[in-house]
Image (tube, helix red, strand yellow):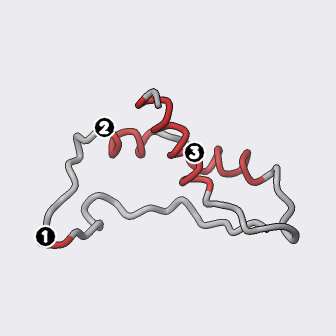
Amino acid sequence: MIRYKSSRQLSISEFKMPFEAKLDENNRWVILSKIVPWEEFARLYYKNFKSNRGAPTKDARLVLGVIIIKHIMKT
């Protein structure tokens, strides 16, 4: 079963953290999140699943993000 969420993510300025902390726009993960074509990867990821059967899918952005981090961190 496909549970698709749009890749519309909060911008850095929209993201609120406790104590009014802010994300660093120069952070490597923040920079990477801006250049990855999330919608294209989501389309490719979801085409492998049936929309009406099976367990719900994980969000494509989560799955791809985990794989990217794994390879960058070499773990």
Residue at x 49%, y 62% (from the top left corner): 8
Q: Nearer the viewer, residue 8 or 68?
A: 68
54 lies above or below 62: below
Residue 3 sits in which quadrant?
A: bottom right
- Dot 3: element: helix
Q: Which quadrant is home to the N terminus?
A: bottom right
Amino acid of disc 1? Glu
Check disc 3 and report the residue beneath it. 64
Residue bearing mark 1: 20
Secondary structure of the residue carrying tag 2 is: helix
The image shows residue 48 at horizontal and vertical percentages of 82, 50
- The image position of residue 22, as x and y in percent, is 17, 60
Q: Disc count in the image?
A: 3
Task: Identify the disc placed on residue 28.
Answer: 2
Dot 1: element: helix
Residue lying at 75% horizontally and 54% vertically, measured from the top left = 46
Quadrant in which residue 9 is drawn: bottom left
Say which residue appears at 70% left-offset and 62% top-offset: 57
